[in-house]
Amino acid sequence: MEILPINAIVYNQEKVSINDVIAPPYDVIDNKYQDELYKRSDYNIVRLILAKGENKYNEASNYFKKWQEDGILIPVKKPSIFYIIQKYTNEKGDLIERKGFIARNKIEEFSTKKILPHEYTMGGPKEDRFKLITSTGAFFSQIFMVYNDTEQVIENSILPKYTSKKPFMDVIDDYDVENVVYLIDDDDDIKLIQKVLENKTLLIADGHHRYETSLRYSKEHPENEYAKYVMSYFTNSADKNLIIYPTHRIIEKNINKDDILNAVKKYYTIETADNKDEFLNKIEEENKKQITTGLILKGDNKFYILKLNPEAKNKIDAPEVLRNLDLTALHELILKKELKFKDEELMAQNGIKYEKRESVAFNSLNHGASAVFIMAYPKMQDILNISGEGYRMPQKSTYFYPKLLSGIVINPIKR
C-alpha cells in the first residue's frame, strides 16, 4: 500500500484550546451534542463536519476559509505523519493504550483486494459526505484502517524516539480518552513507515461511507493528484491494545422467556453460570472453541451460556465463511427463523436494539426488554476471512473503540 505524509492543516494552539475545538466523528453526534459543541467554541470542528442550516455545506466551506484567513487554522511546515496514542480505562478497569498513525494512503478499488471492507454502506451518508468534500475541498476525519505487522517495526523502532519528547497535542475527549499526538516529519522515519506498509493489505475498520465517498470523488476529479489519496488512521492488528468490542442484541419485543428458551434449545447446548463475572468469562473461553453466546432473560435470575451445536451450522443459509460467525447464527436461526424478525426490522432496529455498552445491555431488562443476547468479542481473523472472500459482516458486528477525533489534523485536497 502506498503511504504518504499529509500536507496538513491544524489548529493554531496559540489561539485556541484543543479541548474546545475537537469532536468525535460526525455520525455519533446527535442534535443535542451538536448544540453543545457549537456552544463550546466558535471554532469547534463540528461547524465543519456537521454544519447547520439549509446551506450547511456552503457554511462549512465559509468557516474553513475564514478560519485559515484568521490564523485559527494553519499549515504544518513539512508534510508529516501524526502518531497518536489513545489511553483509556475499559469496563474491567484495565488501562488500554491503542497506538496508530494518521497519514494518506492511495485510494484503491475494492476489486484490487488491497483494501478490504467489512460492512455495508447506505446512500444517504455517502451523498452527505460527498457534498461536504466537494464544497470544502478537504478531509476532516480519518478512515480507520488495520494492517498486520507481527514484528511491530513502527512501534519498536520509531515510536520510542518521540514519546520522550513533548507531544504535538495532548487532549482528553468527552469519553475520558486521552489522545496524545506526536508529529513525525523526519524523512527517514517516514520512509520506514512507508516500507512497512508497502506490501500490506488494509482492512477498513470504520469509515466505510467516507472511504467510498473519497473513491467517488477521486474518480470524478482524475486531474487532482491530491484526491487520489485519502487521510486514514492505521493501527496494527498484532498489537494487543487493538480491541474489537462486541455489539449486544436487546430484544424489545414482548416475547415470553419460555418461548425464547425453547427456540435456542433447538440449536444450542445450554449451560448456566452462577454470577455475571463467571458468565462473561465463560462466554469468551467457550467461544475460543465453538460459537458461544450469552443470554439473560426478563424475570429470570439465571445466566445462560449458549454453545452452538455443530449440526446447527448446516441449517444456516449463508456462505460457509459466514457460518462461523456467532452473529450469523443468532440472526439466521434465532432472530429470523424462530422469533420471526424480518430483515427490515433488524436493519431498522424495530423491536430490537443494538447496544455497545455492556452495562447498558444488562440494565435494559429493568427497562422493558424481554431478553439480551451478550455477544463474545469479535475475532480479527474472522473479519479478515470474511472480507478476504468478498463478503461483509452482519449489521453492527464490530465496535472499534475509542473513536478517532475530528480536529487533530485536516487534509486539504484542493490547492
Image (cartoon, grey):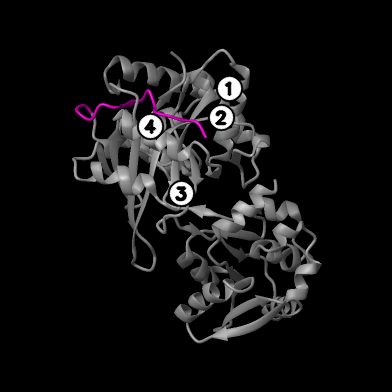
Amino acid on which disc 4 is placed: Lys
The answer for how far apart the CA atoms under marks 2 and 1 are is 8 Å
Amino acid on which disc 1 is placed: Ser
C-beta proximity under 8 Å, tags 4 and 1: no
Label 3 vs label 1, nearer the camera:
3
The answer for how far apart the CA atoms under marks 3 and 1 are is 29 Å
Label 3 vs label 2, nearer the camera:
3
The answer for how far apart the CA atoms under marks 4 and 1 are is 25 Å
- Residue 304, horizontal then vertical, whole percent: 59, 80
| Secondary element at image label 1 | helix
What residue lies at 34% left-to-right and 29% top-to-bottom? Answer: 80
Q: Earlier in the sequence, mark 3 or mark 1?
A: 3
Q: Give the residue at mark 1.
A: 218
**Could one spot residue 142 in this view of the protein?**
yes
- Residue 190, horizontal then vertical, whole percent: 36, 32
What residue lies at 50% left-to-right and 46% top-to-bottom? Answer: 146
Label 2 vs label 4, nearer the camera:
4
Q: Quadrant of residue 372?
A: bottom right
Q: Quadrant of residue 340?
A: bottom right
Magenta part of the protein: which range?
1-15
